[in-house]
Image (spheres, grey):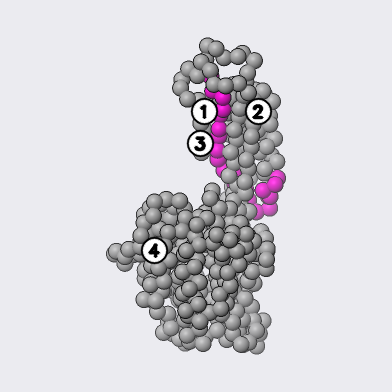
Amino acid sequence: MNPTLDEVRRRVQPARLLALARRLVSIPSPTGQAGSVLDALAEFLDSEGFRVDRPSAGHPEAPAVIARLSATRPGRTLQWNGHLDTVHLPFVPDHVAGGQLRGSGSSDMKAGFAAAVEAVLSLRDGDLLASGTILLTAHDLHEAPWGHGEQFDQLVRDGVVGDAVMIPEPLCEELPTIGRGQACWNVRFARPGPPVHEVMRPMDEPEVITAGGILIKKLRALEDRLHEQTGPQGLKPSVFIGRIQSGEIYNQFPKECVLEGTRRWLPGSSCEEVEREFRDIVVRACQETGATAEIEFRQVRDAFFLENGHDIVSDFQESVRTVTGKSLRLGVKPFVDDGNSVWSLAKAPAITHGPRAGGQHTVNEWVDIDDLSRVALVYAMTAIRFCSRGTDARIA
Ligand SMILES: [Zn+2]
């Protein structure tokens, strides 16, 4: 066996990990209102003897939480980052059943973050971090459409970012090395007059539903063009329509037609360029019908890429192998997360890896309690390897 792993394993306390996870899940924290749960995390870290910083990072209602564990010898900084806000669904309190922790945010991603905190505590307790620093960050404003990552992005812009970042979102079967950027769009076609009976309609006014139909057709053609592009791992850009709404009753001439959806792009494209293309298409639908359009096009996160050759990838994979016996296959990140911001804003590598969990963005979130200790071990072992790089204390 690996003596360092044995040391870490002796220090990881599953009961302490679960208690923190339950405490975080027990506090409602819909996106934008995660102040109380961030306060609770700050109190916990303070009671454990950490110096805690609380920068507002543009969101004073819920200041972020920053804590560090630094070894006496210099080395690299590894950041463990989590969002403690949850999607806006009815609150489900924490409860344990059948080896799982359930409740709002248990899967996405309070329990995973508690595992990262436990990794910091076990390294601290065993004095196992020989060099470098672990930077722990937690924040609000992650979940769209209520947030767009503004608070985390501000932290990164303010220089609060490690040489590499690990994010305990619920994804554990693969190591994602690529992910698409995502924007939400909303188009509101309108005509100037009020709603009227169809037989009274002014014949010189545009048909907003026809404008919507033309937009659907044009976006369908765009989707066909986008599907001809294939990126690494078979990823394709896309445009998606998820909602269309117009009219009050069948024989009233409607005033508005609203469409909503997403646009996703591959690394190498930018949000600005796909937004320009999208706006041009909407403008053409307006020209063909005479309708006016209000367009909202909002980036959720830029695209994501992870260089396979980076030190953090080999240190992480080696640690997964040490803990579980085999490393992870490379894959795709199906969602956007803070790792996208790390790559696009700081050009630092980011690894998304968390516990076996599910039900994210539903009222049935769960996480396997047993797997949380595995995550803590993998995080701790990765830190021991990565933070000692570039120093004399480097561990082979
Ligand atoms: Zn999440």
Q: Which residue is mark 2?
A: 292
Amino acid type of the residue tagged 4 in the rendering: Ser
- Residue reaching furthest to the front: 61
Please rate how many residues cluster around mark 2, counting C-alpha atoms within 10 Å: few if below 14, some from 14 to 19, many from 20.
Answer: many
Please rate how many residues cluster around mark 1, counting C-alpha atoms within 10 Å: few if below 14, some from 14 to 19, many from 20.
Answer: some
Residue 346 vertical placement versus 236 (above, below): below
- x, y percent for residue 89: 42, 50
In whole angstroms, how far apart are the C-alphas of marks 1 and 2?
A: 15 Å
The verdict on residue 244 being magenta is: no
- x, y percent for residue 157: 68, 63
Q: Nearer the viewer, mark 4 or mark 2?
A: 4
* Quarter location, residue 71: bottom right
Amino acid type of the residue tagged 2 in the rendering: Thr
Residue at point 51%, 36% (across, down): 243
Q: Nearer the viewer, mark 1 or mark 3?
A: 1
Which SS class for mark 3? strand
The verdict on residue 270 being magenta is: yes
Q: Which residue is mark 3?
A: 243
* Quarter location, residue 239: top right
In whole angstroms, how far apart are the C-alphas of marks 3 and 2?
A: 19 Å
Q: Which residue is mark 4?
A: 26
Q: Which residue is mark 1?
A: 246
Name the residue nearer the viewer: 101 or 170.
101
In whole angstroms, how far apart are the C-alphas of marks 1 and 4?
A: 41 Å
Q: Which residues are magenta?
A: 253-273
- Residue reaching furthest to the top: 199
In whole angstroms, how far apart are the C-alphas of marks 3 and 4?
A: 34 Å
- x, y percent for residue 250: 46, 20
Residue 117 visible here: no
Q: Earlier in the sequence, mark 3 or mark 2?
A: 3
Residue at point 43%, 66% (across, down): 24
Amino acid type of the residue tagged 3 in the rendering: Arg
